[in-house]
Image (cartoon, rainbow, N blue to C red):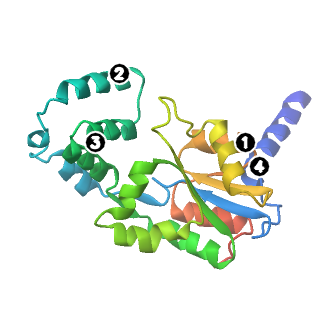
Amino acid sequence: MYSLHKFSIALVIMICSQFTSGMDINYTPQNTQFAFDFHGVVVKPVVNRVSSALLNRNFLYSINLNRYLPALVWSIAVLTYHHGTGEQYIKLLQEYQQPIIAQLALNIANNQQPIPETIAIIKQLKDLGYEVNMASDIGALALKDFAQKEQGKQAQDQILPLFVHRHHVNYLETYKPIQKPNPAYFAAYQQQYNTAHKPYVIFIDDKLKNVTGAREAGMTGILFTSGVQLKDQLVRMGILPIT
C-alpha cells in the first residue's frame, strides 16, 4: 500500500510537470525566439475553394496530349515508387509541358486564409520585441506561388512579412527530403536562424510528432489546437501579458 501511495504521488508530480514545464523560466526577447509552423497554425484551407478546384470539369481538358506525355507517365510512376512529394509532381508537370495542371495543383494547395487569432498573437509577440520565424514543410515552389496568388496581396501584407526568416524544405533535392519531425530539420533551423544562439526556441505546430521532434532537438515545443489555447499557454509562461 505504501509503494502504491508513493507511485501515485510520483504520477501526480509527473503529470503536473507536463503542465508547468517552462512556466518558471524568464522568457525575454533577448533569450527567446519563436518558430511557427505554417499550415494549420498560421493559415487554414478555404474549403469551398479547394472543393471547387477539385470538381472543376475543365481539369481533364487541360491535359496537354503532346509527345512528352509517355515520358511524364513513366516519371510519375518512378516518383510514386520513391514516395515523392507533391512539389516534385508539380515540377514534373511543369517540365513535361503540363503547366495548367501544375498550376491547378498549386491553386488547391495554396487556397489558404489567415487564422486571425494566430496573426494577432504573432503581432503581439513582435510588438514585445520577440523574433518570430516560420518553420514549415512548405516547399519553395508552393511558398513562392502562395505569395503571388490572387490573395497574394493579403499574404504579402498580412502574413509573410510577420516572419523574419522563412524556413522551408527543398523537396527537389532528393526523393527523401529533410522535413519535420527529422531531427536534422530542427538542427538546420537552429544553424540557419538561431545565429544569436538564444537558449530558448519556442516551436509551435499542430502535429504532435513535430512538437515531439522539436523537444528532442532541445526546443520548447507547443502543440497548437487553437488561437485561444496558444494565447492562454503563452500567458501562463509569462510571455504575453494577462488581458
**Alpha carbon separation for disc pair 3 and 4:** 53 Å
Q: Quadrant of residue 47?
A: bottom left
- Residue 20 rendering spot, x and y as whole percentages: 76, 55
- Residue 79 rendering spot, x and y as whole percentages: 37, 26
Q: Are the residues flagged by discs 1 and 4 in contact, CB closer than 8 Å?
A: no
**Alpha carbon separation for disc pair 4 and 2:** 50 Å
Q: Which mark is residue 78?
A: 2
Question: Which residue appears at 79% of the width and 69% of the height?
Answer: 30
In front: label 1 or label 4: 1
Q: Is residue 156 left or right of residue 204?
A: left
Q: Residues within 10 Å of mark 3 (few under 14, many from 20)?
A: some
* Among the two numbered marks 1 and 4 on one chain, the one whose residue lies closer to the N terminus: 4
Q: Nearer the viewer, residue 6 or 40?
A: 40
Circle 1 SS class: loop
Q: Nearer the viewer, residue 201 or 3?
A: 201
Q: Which mark is residue 16?
A: 4
In front: label 4 or label 2: 2
Q: Amino acid at mark 3?
A: Gln
Q: Is residue 220 visible?
A: no
**Alpha carbon separation for disc pair 1 and 3:** 37 Å
Question: Which residue appears at 18% of the width and 29% of the height?
Answer: 69
Q: Which mark is residue 71?
A: none
- Residue 22 rendering spot, x and y as whole percentages: 78, 56
Q: Which mark is residue 94?
A: 3
Quarter of the figure that contains the N terminus: top right
